[in-house]
Image: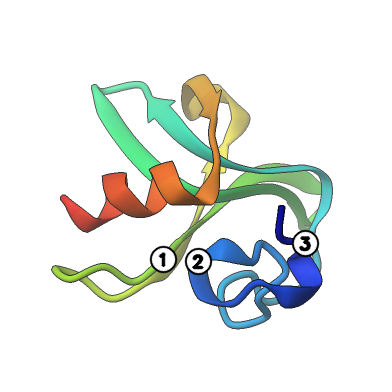
């Protein structure tokens, strides 16, 4: 099994290009389901901005789109399904 120290790119949740800035609390690769029948897959964490806590999703680059970071209020999240980076990479490459 590889450790975060010897992983690169999407395999490494500590990749500073993938997860920039300060995060706290729970972190995991996950599919986040949002109200309005939307799904987003990427590296999930919590981040406090202006005294409010947001769900932060760092979506990796795929064949079809550039990577990006998006913040969601807790009330916008319907479900979170944790998964490994390999599964997330496959899911995001289809989008």
How far is the residue under mark 1 from the one under mark 2?
A: 7 Å
- Give the residue number, with chain letter if any, for mark 2: 10
In the current view of this chain or complex, which residue is farthest to the bottom?
A: 17
Pick the front one: 78 or 43: 43
Residue 35 image position (x, y, % from top left): 35, 21
Can you tell which mark lies on residue 60?
Answer: 1
Q: Secondary structure at mark 3?
A: loop
Q: Which residue is found at the position 77% from the left and 62% from the top?
A: 3
Q: Is residue 35 left or right of residue 20?
A: left
Quarter of the view holding residue 26: top right
Residue 72's tag is none
Residue that numbered label 3 is attached to: 3
For the residues labelled 2 and 3, the Cα–Cα distance comes to: 13 Å
User: Residue placed at 66% from the left, 62% from the top?
Assistant: 13
SS at badge 2: helix
Label 2 packing within 10 angstroms: few (<14), some (14-19), many (20+): many
* Image coords of residue 1 (percent x, y): 71, 52
Cβ atoms under marks 1 and 2 closer than 8 Å: yes
Q: Is residue 53 above or below residue 17?
A: above
- Foreground mark, 2 or 3? 3
Residue nearest the observer in this picture, 63 or 3: 3
Residue 32 percent coordinates (x, y): 45, 32
Q: Are the residues at dot 3 and dot 1 in contact (C-beta closer than 8 Å)?
A: no
């Amino acid at each position: 099994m590889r450790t975060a120290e010897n992983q690169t790119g999407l395999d490494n949740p500590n990749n500073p290009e993938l997860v920039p800035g300060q995060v706290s609390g729970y972190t995991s690769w996950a599919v986040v389901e949002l109200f309005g029948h939307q799904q987003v897959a990427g590296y999930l964490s919590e981040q406090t901005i202006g005294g409010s806590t947001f769900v932060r999703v760092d979506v990796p680059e795929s064949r079809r789109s550039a990577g990006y970071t998006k913040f969601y209020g807790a009330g916008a999240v319907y479900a979170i399904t944790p998964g490994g980076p390999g599964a997330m990479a496959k899911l995001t490459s289809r989008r």
